[in-house]
Amino acid sequence: MALSFGAISLRSKNVKKLFHFLSFVFDLDNISERANGDIHFELCQVSFLISHSDSESISFSGFTLEVDSLEELKEYFQVLEFYGYKENMENVNCQYNDDLLCFSDPDGRRWEIIVNKRVLLSDNQMNLSNVRHC
C-alpha cells in the first residue's frame, strides 16, 4: 500500500503576494498558475497550492525545513534581508541565530529553517578531534 501527500494547501488573502515572497526566498520552480488564480509549485519535492481566501481566520500553520550547513542557513537569512530591501520594507520579520532562522510569510505563517542535526553533530565531532589533551 503506497500513501503520499497531495498538494499542501496554503490559503491567502493575496495569492500573488504570497507566491512572490515564497518564490523569491526559495527560488521556486515547477510552477503553474491555474485559470481560477491558484498557484501550484513544488518545494523540497512537496507540492503546494496557494489559493485565495477572504476569510479573516486563515490557518496559521508552520513549516520547518532543514539545510545541510550553517552557510546555507546564512544565505537564506541574506535572501530575506535582500527581499526586505528590494520591497522597501523597514524590517523583515525574522529571527536568526547560529542554527535557526524563523520568519513569517505575508499571511503570517511561521517558517523555520534549521541546520540538520547530523551535520551539527559531525561538525562538533570534527572540532573536538582538533582538541589537544594535556
Image: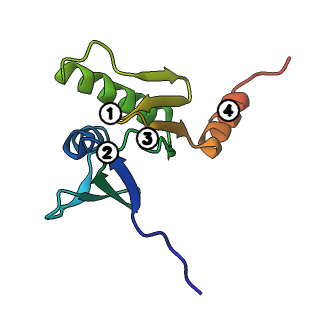
Residue 106 numbered mark, or none: 1
Question: To which residue does mark 4 refer?
Answer: 124
Q: CA distance from mark 1 to mark 4?
A: 36 Å
Label 2 with label 3: CB-CB less than 8 Å: no
What residue do we see at 32% from left, 28% from top? 80
Q: Horizontal and vertical percent for residue 36?
A: 17, 61
Q: Residues within 10 Å of mark 3 (few under 14, many from 20)?
A: few
Q: Secondary structure at mark 3?
A: loop
Q: Horizontal and vertical percent for residue 5?
A: 48, 69
Please indicate whether residue 76 sits to the left or right of residue 100 in the image. left
Q: CA distance from mark 2 to mark 4?
A: 41 Å
Residue 12 numbered mark, or none: 2
Label 1 with label 2: CB-CB less than 8 Å: yes
Residue 57 numbered mark, or none: 3
Q: Amino acid at mark 3?
A: Ser
Q: Nearer the viewer, mark 1 or mark 4?
A: 1
Question: Which comes sooner in the sequence, label 1 or label 2?
Answer: 2
Question: Which comes sooner in the sequence, label 2 or label 4?
Answer: 2
Q: Quadrant of residue 43?
A: bottom left
Q: Horizontal and vertical percent for residue 76?
A: 37, 33
Question: Which comes sooner in the sequence, label 1 or label 4?
Answer: 1
Question: Which comes sooner in the sequence, label 1 or label 3?
Answer: 3
**Farthest residue, direction top:** 90
Q: Amino acid at mark 1?
A: Pro
Q: Amino acid at mark 4?
A: Asn
